[in-house]
Image: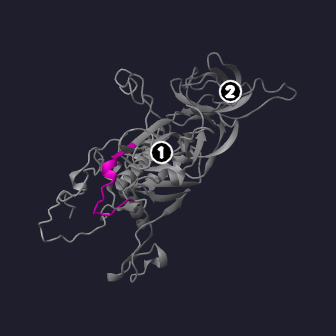
Amino acid sequence: MPVLSTPGFQLQPSAEQVPLSTNYITNFNFLNQYLPDTYEKEFERYGNRTVASFLRLVGAEMPSNSDLIKWAEQGRLHTKYTNCATSAAAGADSATITVNDANVTAIAIRAGQTVFISDNATGLSNKGIVTAVNTATDTFTVAYYEGPGQTFAITATVSVWIYGSEFKKGTVGMVGSLEAEDEIFQNSPIIIKDKYAVSGSDMAQIGWVEVTTENGATGYLWYLKSEHETRLRFEDYLETAMIEAVPAESGSGAANSALNPSFGNKGSEGIFYVVNSRGNVWGGGNPTTLADFDTIISRLDKQGSIEENVIFVNRDFSFDIDDMLATLNGFNGTGAAQAASFGLFDNDTDMALNLGFSGFRRGYDFYKSDWKYLNDPTMRGGLPTGASASGTVTGLLVPAGSTTVYDQILGKNAKRPFLHVRYRATEAEDRRYKTWITGSAGGAQTSDLDAMEVNFLSERCVCTLGANNFVLFRYGS
């Protein structure tokens, strides 16, 4: 039966901008002769509450000293156009082909080259040799090798790619040459801040509850807990901002200096934004069959064909992969002896059954890893799922390893992880993770404020190299 909605999980935040009455002792009645039994130590009922870990596993951090980070990525080696038209009718010995592909400034086809021409709808094809080229109009003339001539109709939309060349004896060489054209991408770092403040009087107040946080800080001073939780929250934001950041579009409220005069108004390109824009997107939620994964593998074949990939998934996606793999290797015994044959020692019936998989190979190696950020109900774990949901992310496929790019700062080719963070830094100022204390309490002596203020700051952005090798799994087209 389904899990009842009541009682459920608590989403009320434990942090407030004012001191909570529950944080301090309010009953100092010494006339009461009975003292309660108390557990001095806080019970950690939500376990490890932090969600940061993704970028630590797959990325790296390196300095940058500019407001803008640019890098170049290689384009395709071979030439293919997929939106072309022919001037000739079926049966013609030659034709003029017009290239209508977007973003083509000058076609990379030269006289003497041999081309394959295919009808996008029917697959009918011809092979021919290019006899003339007009780069001003993006057209070329082709003479067909086949005796019956052109196999497709004049109304057909065709694809063209080059497979070689042919010249007569004693002729001059190829006319013209091709220049490599890189794709230039860029991102801009954003400034992330936080602050914790406590008055000097509250710092001098001892508590009766021993507090603790995920990083091991303990004590009977409540402000220690709040300060450490602010630090942990800030560290989570350093990662989630790199995942979720979007650029401020022209005409948006964030970019409008009148509506937003005091805060950031440029944004940045986070991982989800980049993969949505120029990566691969599976819009059906979770692929649950091998046929689904075969579709994804077919797309990866058309991209960088990275051998090893890690899929970071939410809990439902993880179970769907386990269920899919389990059905591929089932052993059906008789009676009560039925068991699954996958796992350590074939999962003997007298052993604990392991129903989970850490990865599989089908064309490429796929490793699976649970992503807490997608499961946490205070983050993306609380978003709707199913066919009616739109935009809910269930997983992200990240290629393993590194890629070679031209680094504008170094002025040479360099190997970089596909995902890495660039933070602002020079010899005089390192803004990777800054923290400083102001005020007149807690050892600080920088002002006459009777408080301690702990400030946090970082300036960073994420670089998603080779986004065409990533796959984002989400609901909605």
Q: Is residue 317 part of the magenta span, yes or no?
A: no
Name the residue nearer the viewer: 426 or 3. Answer: 426
Tag 2: amino acid: Ile
Tag 1: amino acid: Thr
Labelled disc at residue 109: 2
Label 2 secondary element: loop
- Snapshot quadrant of residue 132: top right
As measured in the structure, the alpha-carbon distance from the residue carrying label 1 to the one carrying label 2 is 57 Å
Image quarter (top left, top right, bottom left or bottom right) of the C terminus? top left
Q: Earlier in the sequence, mark 1 or mark 2?
A: 2
User: Does residue 34 appear to the left or right of 131 in the view shown?
Assistant: left
Label 1 secondary element: strand
**Relative to 281, residue 28 above or below:** below
For marks 1 and 2, give the one nearer the viewer: 1
User: Does residue 459 appear to the left or right of 256 in the view shown?
Assistant: right
Residue range (magenta): 195-213
Q: Is residue 206 part of the magenta span, yes or no?
A: yes
Labelled disc at residue 335: none
Which residue sits at x=62%, y=20%? Answer: 138
User: Does residue 428 appear to the left or right of 379 in the view shown?
Assistant: right
Which residue sits at x=36%, y=78%? Answer: 338
**Relative to 460, residue 181 above or below:** above
- Residue 385 visible in rendering: no
Judging by the rendered image, the residue that carries numbered circle 1 is: 435
